[in-house]
Image (cartoon, rainbow, N blue to C red):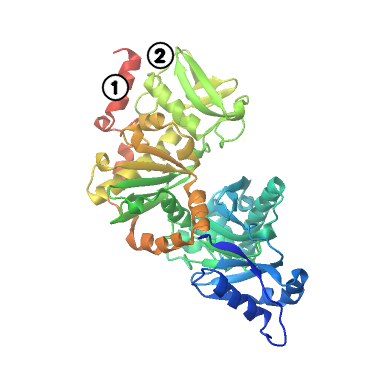
Amino acid sequence: MNTALCQKIYLALNPPTEEDSRSAQIRILETLKKTTELVEPVKMTLPVMRRLEQICPLENWNITVTLCWDENRWLITNAEPGNHEQEVYGLAVDLGSTTVVMQLVDCHTGKVLAQTSVRNRQRERGLEILSRIFYAKDQPDHLEELRSLTVDSISEGISLLESQTGIKGKNCSYMVISGNNAMIHFLAGIDPFPVFSSPYAVWADQIGFCSGEELQLPISGMVYCIPARANYLGGDIISGLIDVDIYHQKQIQLFFDVGTNGELVIGNQDFLIAGAGAAGPALEGEAIQTGMRASRGAVSKVHLSDNTFTLSTIDDAPPVGICGSGITDMIAELYLNGWIDTKGRFLPEQSDKIAWQEDRQEYGVCYAQNLWFYESDIAEFLKAKAAACTMIQILLQEIGIEVEDVENLYMAGAFGTHIDKHSAVTIGMYPDIPLEKIHRAGNSSLNGARKLLLDKNKLEEIPKILALMSYLQFGSVDNFLSEMTAAAAIPHTNIEKYPSVEEERRRRSGK
């Protein structure tokens, strides 16, 4: 039985006669009830009713109706002459603050037909979410501008998918969108300022089901926005939990989506505790002198041996900068080879490649032609990794367990997907647990949206997740700053927490 949020059903209707003068509307609804396994109520939308006179006679009353799920009933959102039962398409959308990632999905087979990503056009009004929030505050025209830019971004993605597949947006019957609270507020044209401002009571965090027309999105059917849990814990994290499924497990699991912001959830089938906080742009390559996002020419892997750097770049292009995964490798390799100390300071006596830069008044190392990595870069990155490490530590303290009690650690997001697990443990971003316990969850926000698109039964799990979940404001934790200070060292001030790192450092030094 098809469990997708949308489906198409072919109906061979009997044309009306004097003996059977039922309306086309009733004829369709009664035939659906007789010939399908649908048990939920079905309602025909007004736009479809207006088109029945053109549609029904064209193929001698043989038509295909599109049904879209609307919380507790099916809506007939389209009707076509002839049999188009297998041509049912949907869109899964990860509405990120920097990038919008989309998949075109065949809802009949479950196959992903194409995927694309576009730059979020909101960035025209601020690189950081906070700057966009202030841009819209008390400025209805600015809020409308950001709403329009959001719609334009999604529409651009739909156009790119059409160019790949030939399937138009108007032929897509459903869209599931996951995004943080601010992004969903901007999409809906709702002021997101409470996301940032105490008491952090947002105007709406369960927008749920809307028509594409209401949101001015170029699709023919419905849109579902995945609910949020708190101001900084949005639908992208709820979607991620649906993907990794930690709320059905007996053992303690940890889910961490880390980028400029970090959102994490720890728990199992009995409880979920969540928290969120700023990690900093350094994890995504920003705030680093030669840092960049993961695009063509970005150094993504670094190995240091015999005083020589071995680099890998995205698309094997000549190096033009270094992205988050490459930075993690760089710091790990510098530390393991003894070129920097636990505070991230260069030790120039260890290599002639470490040079004092007079113009910057700091040490640096040249890792590729005209590309330098500086002490200040390390300091910036260590702030971000300390925040990420501390978030994990605080949640563990909250439930009174040690990291060894965690069965699995799921790292989500672009950073968590590409980072080398060994390097992340080396610098102290990940806890020192067996690497087989650490899993790359990929774009769990997008994956969860697709799973919801293909299985409406998963909608029933969202209220259960929200009911299980408690939210912790890290700002209210007394020892957060002291824990973060301790985590700013490589790998940690408490070196006993990272035995494998010290063992590897001794091995490389020959001691």
Q: Would residue 358 be seen by someone viewing this image from the given angle? A: no
Which of these two is toward me, 485 or 358?
485
Image location (x, y in percent) of residue 81:
72, 67
Left or right: residue 469 compared with residue 38: left
Which of these two is toward me, 438 or 339?
438
Seen at 37% across and 37% down, the residue is 438
Within-10-Å neighbours for mark 1: few <14, some 14–19, many 20+ = few
Image location (x, y in percent) of residue 334:
42, 22
Count of marks overlaid on the render = 2
Q: Would residue 426 be seen by someone viewing this image from the given angle? A: yes
- SS of the residue under disc 2: helix
Say which residue label 1 marks: 503
Seen at 59% across and 20% down, the residue is 369
- Above-or-below relation of 352 to 450: above
- SS of the residue under disc 1: helix
User: From the image, which quarter does the C terminus lie in?
Assistant: top left
Residue 349's label in the rendered image is 2
Residues at circles 2 and 1 in contact by the CB criterion of under 8 Å: no
Q: Which comes sooner in the sequence, label 2 or label 1?
A: 2
Q: Amino acid at mark 2?
A: Glu
Tell which residue pokes out farthest to the left in this image. Answer: 400
Q: Amino acid at mark 1?
A: Glu
Which of these two is toward me, 482 or 437?
437
> Residue 411 is drawn in which quadrant?
top left
Image location (x, y in percent) of residue 161:
67, 49
Which of these two is toward me, 252 or 508?
252
Seen at 23% across and 45% down, the residue is 401
Residue 487's label in the rendered image is none
Seen at 61% across and 29% down, the residue is 315
- Above-or-below relation of 45 to 193: below
Image location (x, y in percent) of residue 113:
62, 47
